[in-house]
Image: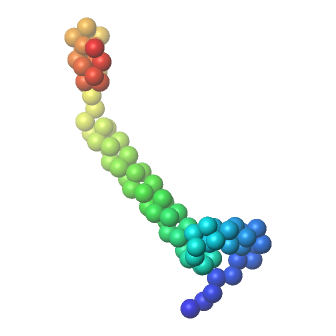
């Protein structure tokens, strides 16, 4: 297995500081940080997928245009929980 060598002294010091705070090795601290970042990126990708699907659904099934009648306002106010 290859070892991890951090060339930048500030980054190496940060890894050491986090490792001490976690009570682990620098390698474990870096691994933990990378796994957390990877999970964030994957969650962001999933969220973007959901938004794309919602946008496609909205395009395929748009709301009807407002008529300007008072009944429409009351209907939509009720949908949003407004009195």
- For this orientation, the residue located farthest to the top is 70
Residue 79 relative to residue 5: left or right? left
The structure residue drawn at horizontal position 63% and vertical position 76%, both measured from the top left corner, is 26
Q: Give residue 14's position: percent from left, percent from top.
A: 69, 67
In the foreground, 56 or 28: 28
Q: Give residue 10's position: percent from left, percent from top.
A: 76, 68
Task: Please state, as top left, top right, bottom left or bottom right, where the C terminus lies in the image.
Answer: top left
In the foreground, 44 or 61: 44
In the foreground, 56 or 26: 26
Residue 53 relative to residue 10: left or right? left
Residue 13 relative to residue 31: left or right? right
Q: Is residue 78 above or below residue 48?
A: above
Q: Quadrant of residue 55?
A: top left
The structure residue drawn at horizontal position 45% and vertical position 54%, both measured from the top left corner, is 44
Let me know if residue 76 appears in the view: no
Task: Please state, as top left, top right, bottom left or bottom right, where the N terminus lies in the image.
Answer: bottom right
Q: How many marks?
A: 0
Q: Give residue 79's position: percent from left, percent from top.
A: 25, 24
Q: Quadrant of residue 57?
A: top left
Q: Give residue 20's position: percent from left, percent from top.
A: 64, 71
The structure residue drawn at horizontal position 77% and vertical position 72%, both measured from the top left corner, is 9
- For this orientation, the residue located farthest to the bottom is 1
Q: Is residue 79 above or below residue 51?
A: above
Let me know if residue 61 appears in the view: yes
Colouring rule applied to residues? rainbow
């Amino acid at each position: 297995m290859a070892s991890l060598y951090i060339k930048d002294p500030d980054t190496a010091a940060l890894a050491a500081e986090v490792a001490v705070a976690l009570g682990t090795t620098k390698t474990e601290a870096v691994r933990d940080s990378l796994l957390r970042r990877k999970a964030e990126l994957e969650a962001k990708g999933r969220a973007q997928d959901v938004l794309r699907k919602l946008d496609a659904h909205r395009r395929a099934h748009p709301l009807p245009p407002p008529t300007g009648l008072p009944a429409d306002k009351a209907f939509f106010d009720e949908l949003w929980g407004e009195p």
